[in-house]
């Protein structure tokens, strides 16, 4: 299946008809329902003392499950294989910035809630606190193309998702900011529903302003997840029941992810060594073909990696001392949380990554990144609507003026 990349890049999304061929729809619905039944049993067992009998299934505005262990066997392997098809993976391969690195990056099923929860807030899937200012992400998108793509593939007709076409390229307009601040749960000027028939899919850049417009009790079983160029599969036990090719595919992605972790370490060591040439060639190995704006974005991600390692080391020291050593100055709660949760698309490989560096090396890295980190922050806390970050000093929208990749490298010494 050949898709129109130019249209995709302009609008930020493409509707792909019959991602699930009609003759496969009934069986796939049944397989996903088996997954739902299994997850519901787990949620019922895990419910808290004040929860209703079905636990999370009943309390969440959007119950969401993932086809991993222990839900997967011969009967439900199809819920993983859907991500490996030519008209999902093959389409993403035509759209991502490094086609040969295209891999699965998250697999979920979104379900309707038991009680009506109405609209969610409009947002971009961007949290500038541990990613980068929106314009830095957009410069990279323009220069290199997307590193991650998101899909919604409904198993029943679905028009819950709304988007503002073309908003992935730009910051919010004044009208959007005004409307979002007034009420982020109302239709936004320029927003349109993505109307999908059962089995159709939409692939989109999740920098787009988008909206879960109505989490009502109408049946919703929508396959949701994506593909990226930075795979992260610490545990492959879910793949035991896949076809031999499927298993081989995930093993190859696991290996690629480990190589990328090694390259992330190597890039940080080049910063420690003050070795600009090695830094440049390591970023090139991490993301073949990446341009200046992409390298600047990767540098910001590496700056966050250093901050995350500091948090992890601080936590580990506190645990070893068998108590709390108090909060870490200048690190917000949000950054602390992101230190403990992997986010591979921004080369955050999770807390174990900190084991690769000593305390002294981490401190030295923070000194190397100090100027960049300062340039990314205002003096005061502030807030911009439409993101997944609360008020903070880090800039939501603007990249530092007069501070590019060469200035960052010059700031090491
Ligand atoms: O419900 C949907 O289709 C959108 C979900 C979404 O935007 C999200 O989880 O970030
Ligand atoms: Fe989202």
Image (cartoon, grey):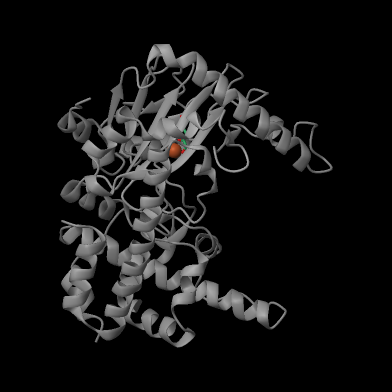
Nearer to us in this view, 180 or 206: 206
Q: Is residue 184 visible to the viewer in this orientation of the structure?
A: no
Q: In this view, does 93 lie to the left or right of 334?
A: left
The image quadrant where one finds the C terminus is: bottom left
Q: Is residue 168 visible to the viewer in this orientation of the structure?
A: yes
Residue 5 x, y percent position in the rendering: 18, 32
Image vertical order of residue 257 relative to residue 312, above or below: above
- At horizontal 26% and vertical 45% (from top left) the residue drawn is 146
Q: Choose top left, top right, bottom left or bottom right for residue 154.
A: top left
Q: In which quarter of the image is ligand 2?
A: top left
- At horizontal 49% and vertical 53% (from top left) the residue drawn is 390
The image quadrant where one finds the N terminus is: top left
Residue 262 x, y percent position in the rendering: 35, 69
| Most distant residue in the right direction | 49
Image vertical order of residue 272 relative to residue 69, above or below: below
Nearer to us in this view, 77 or 372: 77
Q: In this view, does 299 lie to the left or right of 224?
A: left
Nearer to us in this view, 125 or 70: 70
Q: Choose top left, top right, bottom left or bottom right for residue 328.
A: bottom right
- At horizontal 47% and vertical 27% (from top left) the residue drawn is 186
| Most distant residue in the front direction | 244
- At horizontal 33% and vertical 62% (from top left) the residue drawn is 260
Nearer to us in this view, 253 or 205: 253
Image vertical order of residue 186 relative to residue 401, above or below: above
Q: How many marks?
A: 0
Residue 207 x, y percent position in the rendering: 33, 42
Image vertical order of residue 195 relative to residue 6, above or below: above
């Amino acid at each position: 299946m050949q898709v129109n990349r130019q249209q995709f890049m302009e609008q930020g999304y493409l509707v792909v008809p019959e991602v699930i061929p009609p003759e496969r729809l009934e069986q796939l619905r049944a397989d996903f329902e088996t997954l739902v039944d299994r997850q519901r049993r787990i949620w019922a067992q895990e419910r808290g003392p004040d929860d209703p009998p079905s636990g999370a299934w009943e309390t969440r505005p959007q119950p969401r499950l993932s086809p991993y262990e222990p839900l997967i066997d011969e009967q439900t392997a199809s819920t993983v294989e859907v991500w490996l098809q030519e008209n999902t993976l093959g389409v993403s391969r035509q759209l991502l910035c490094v086609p040969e690195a295209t891999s699965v990056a998250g697999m979920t099923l979104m379900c309707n809630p038991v009680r009506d929860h109405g609209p969610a807030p409009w947002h971009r899937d961007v949290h500038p606190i541990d990613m980068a200012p929106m314009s830095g992400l957009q410069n990279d998108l323009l220069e290199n193309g997307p590193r991650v793509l998101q899909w919604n593939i409904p198993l029943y007709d679905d028009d819950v998702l709304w988007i503002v076409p073309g908003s992935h390229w730009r910051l919010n307009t004044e009208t959007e900011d005004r409307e979002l601040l007034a009420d982020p749960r109302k239709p936004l000027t320029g927003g349109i529903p993505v109307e999908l028939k059962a089995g159709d899919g939409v692939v989109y850049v999740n920098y787009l302003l988008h909206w879960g417009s109505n989490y009502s009790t109408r049946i919703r079983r929508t396959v949701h997840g994506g593909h990226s160029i930075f795979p992260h599969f610490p545990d492959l036990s879910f793949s035991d029941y896949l076809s031999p090719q499927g298993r081989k595919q995930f093993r190859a992605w696991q290996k690629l992810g480990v190589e990328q972790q090694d390259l992330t370490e190597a890039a940080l060591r080049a910063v420690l060594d003050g070795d600009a040439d090695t830094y440049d060639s390591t970023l090139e190995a991490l993301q073949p073909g990446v341009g200046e704006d992409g390298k600047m974005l990767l540098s910001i991600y590496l700056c966050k990696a250093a901050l995350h390692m500091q948090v992890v080391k601080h936590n580990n020291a506190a645990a070893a001392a068998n108590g709390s050593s108090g909060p870490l100055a200048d690190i917000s709660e949000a950054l602390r949380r992101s230190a403990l949760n992997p986010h591979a698309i921004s080369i955050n490989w999770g807390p174990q990554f900190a084991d690769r560096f000593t305390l002294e090396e981490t401190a030295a890295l923070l000194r190397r990144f100090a100027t960049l980190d300062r340039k990314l922050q205002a003096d005061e806390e502030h807030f911009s609507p439409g993101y997944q970050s609360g008020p903070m000093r880090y800039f939501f929208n603007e990249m530092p003026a007069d501070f590019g990749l060469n200035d960052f490298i010059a700031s090491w010494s």
